[in-house]
Amino acid sequence: MSTKLELTNIEKVFKTKTGDVKALSNIFLSVEPGEFLAVVGPSGCGKSTIMRIIAGLDKPTNGTVEINDKPLKKIADGAAVVFQKDVLLAWRSVLDNVLFPLELKGITWLDRKNKQTNRSKALELLESVGLKGFEDKYPHELSGGMKQRVSICRALIQDPKLLLMDEPFGALDALTREQMMYDLLKLSDKYGFTTVFITHSIEEAVFLSDKVVVMSERPGTILKELPIALQRPRHGSTREEPEFNKQVQNIRSIFKTQGIIAEI
Ligand SMILES: Nc1ncnc2c1ncn2[C@@H]1O[C@H](COP(=O)(O)OP(=O)(O)OP(=O)(O)O)[C@@H](O)[C@H]1O
């Protein structure tokens, strides 16, 4: 069962040497099991802070986070995180990088059956993102897009119920980014995890999501929550549908009204 998520009246203030920095204010957010939520907003509006709070990596100053109707304690159970920059271990092969989270969880290598099952699952994940045959390579032998694919496999080997992605395609070129969106859609359709996806890209947010949350400048508040009524499975041609363009324009006009985008 994928994760249900509820954020109630979240506020986050960072104490710094030069004074308080209010990063988030008045954040209310519900994500249903299996839902794909994108958070889009200007730089510095608190997107990563929201994600860190959901993951349990940071605590809100006020407000509550509930996972499956229970208050979040330390690290969110069943959650896996993918960051903008891959955090692969240089000295481990691709396959061993994918398997690393299982080792951290203490899943033992002494059990031959376990080892075989996990290895097969890792190879299947790598194949599903076009990395068949790369399992014995090392991170320095891969392109940026390949490394990020390995990071996604490493998140998915944990069989997450909640996938948290913080600008996972932000550092990639446009073509790789497009392919990664298709790969992610396929994986999300196949495994059905709940996703929270942070991005700067309006088009990416609309194309991938069931719901887009649009944030203001800092202190980040939610300006609008837009349900995206595009059918699944999504295809390249989804971007030609009137609903896609309507929602992209909706979001753009919110940013224009806020002075975040100044058109020429
Ligand atoms: N540990 C921290 N200490 C002090 N201030 C912080 C800390 N982490 C974040 N901030 C501040 O909180 C605000 C929100 O930061 P955050 O990284 O969440 O924004 P963001 O929307 O993810 O930005 P970007 O899109 O540029 O990655 C920023 O003003 C940032 O400087």
Image (cartoon, rainbow, N blue to C red):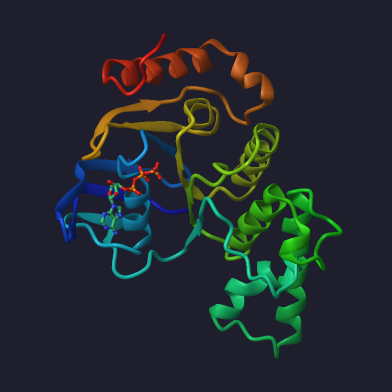
Q: Position of residue 71 (x, y in %)?
A: 25, 62
Position of 263 with respect to 134 (left or right) is left
> Could you say where residue 25 lies in the image, as x and y percent from the top left?
18, 43
Compared across the picture, whether 20 is left or right of 238 comes to left
Of the pair 242 and 218, the residue shown nearer to us = 218
Whether residue 68 is visible here, answered yes or no, is no
In the foreground, 61 or 233: 61
| Nearer the observer, 175 or 183 | 175
Q: Quadrant of residue 212?
A: top left
32 shown above or below 67: above
Q: Find residue 89 and report its horizontal and vertical position in percent.
A: 63, 70
Residue furthest to the right in view is: 133
Q: Going 42% across and 8% down the picture, which residue do you hit?
A: 264
Is residue 29 among what the camera can see?
Answer: yes
Q: Quadrant of residue 221?
A: top left
Query: Which residue appears at 54% of the width and 41% of the height?
Result: 170
Q: Can you say whether 116 is above or below 76 in the image?
A: below
In the picture shown, does residue 42 fall above or below 46? above
